[in-house]
Image (spheres, rainbow, N blue to C red):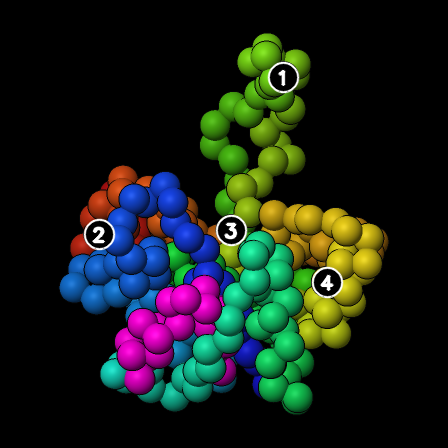
Amino acid sequence: MRINAVIVAAGEGKRMGAGAPKPLLPLCGRPVLLHTLAAFAASRAGRAIVVVAEKERSRFERLLRGSDLGRLEWTLQNGGPRRQDSVARGLDVVDADCEIVVVHDAVRPLVSPELIDRCIDAAAKEGAAVVGVPVADTIKLVSPERRIEGTPSRASLWAIQTPQAFRVGLLREAHRGAETAGVEATDDAMLVERLGKTVVVVEGDRRNIKITTPEDLALAEALLGRPPGKP
């Protein structure tokens, strides 16, 4: 089974306030993106399409050409104005014989190869799968005026992460439908849900954080220095 990964690395990262795209920031001595790609190199994915901002493409090109990614093939692709557009452009260049595509945020560098493979297995069986963790905090529905309007039960609430894996044809259909309808979604699973298709949740890892702020980068540094399962 041929598996490709679309690694989304085209965001501007305004909240980070750094002079470089977040995937290129150093994390324990090497760029965030290389930690992410190392996990995919150790997974069943055979090729990674790294979707980047066109103006930053040369920086990513230099990094990847100078890096040993083992058996993992890679391609750069220019991104679009929204994350959704960037994923769609990644889908444009997946291998012709690709059966499962895994979409992942470049700035989730603590993802494990095992988690990627479990998501792939679930998508191969069900068609679409996402990684998530049960919500631990109490969640409130809050109005624009910051008045509490409700408290949903935590029993059915999960915080959804990436990776998210799909049969290629299904994800392409979902993106085409969203483009035709002018729908914008915050993740690819939402687009598949619009088709009335089942998306299953694979229990993930709370270490699989998304680096958005300087505090997240510091936390990732601490977690990388701590073996999984250790407090």
Name the spot of residue 199 as percent of width and height, x first: 70, 56
Query: Tag on residue 221?
Result: 2
Total marks in image: 4
Q: Does 78 appear above or below 164?
A: below
- Where's the C terminus, which quadrant? top left
- Where's the N terminus, which quadrant? bottom right
The residue tagged 4 is: 175
Dot 2 and dot 1 residues touching (CB under 8 Å): no
Q: Residue at x 18, y 60 (%)?
A: 28
Query: Distance between the Cα atoms at labels 2 and 3?
Result: 19 Å
Dot 4 and dot 3 residues touching (CB under 8 Å): no
Q: Is residue 159 visible?
A: yes
Front: mark 1 or 3: 1
Answer with left or right where residue 137 lies relative to residue 15: right
**Circle 2: residue type:** Glu
**Circle 4: residue type:** His
Label 2 CA crowd tier, 10 Å (few <14, some 14–19, many 20+): some
Front: mark 4 or 3: 4
Query: Distance between the Cα atoms at labels 1 and 3?
Result: 25 Å
**Residue 3's image quarter?**
bottom right
**Mark positioned earlier in the residue sequence (2 or 1):** 1
Query: Distance between the Cα atoms at labels 2 and 1?
Result: 36 Å
**Mark positioned earlier in the residue sequence (1 or 3):** 1
Assign a secondary structure to mark 3: strand
**Magenta stretch holds residue 192:** no
- Secondary structure mostly seen in magenta is helix
The residue tagged 1 is: 143
Q: Nearer the viewer, residue 231 or 182?
A: 182
Name the spot of residue 67 as percent of width and height, x first: 27, 81
Q: Residue at x 61, y 86 (%)?
A: 95
Q: Residue at x 75, y 74 (%)?
A: 169
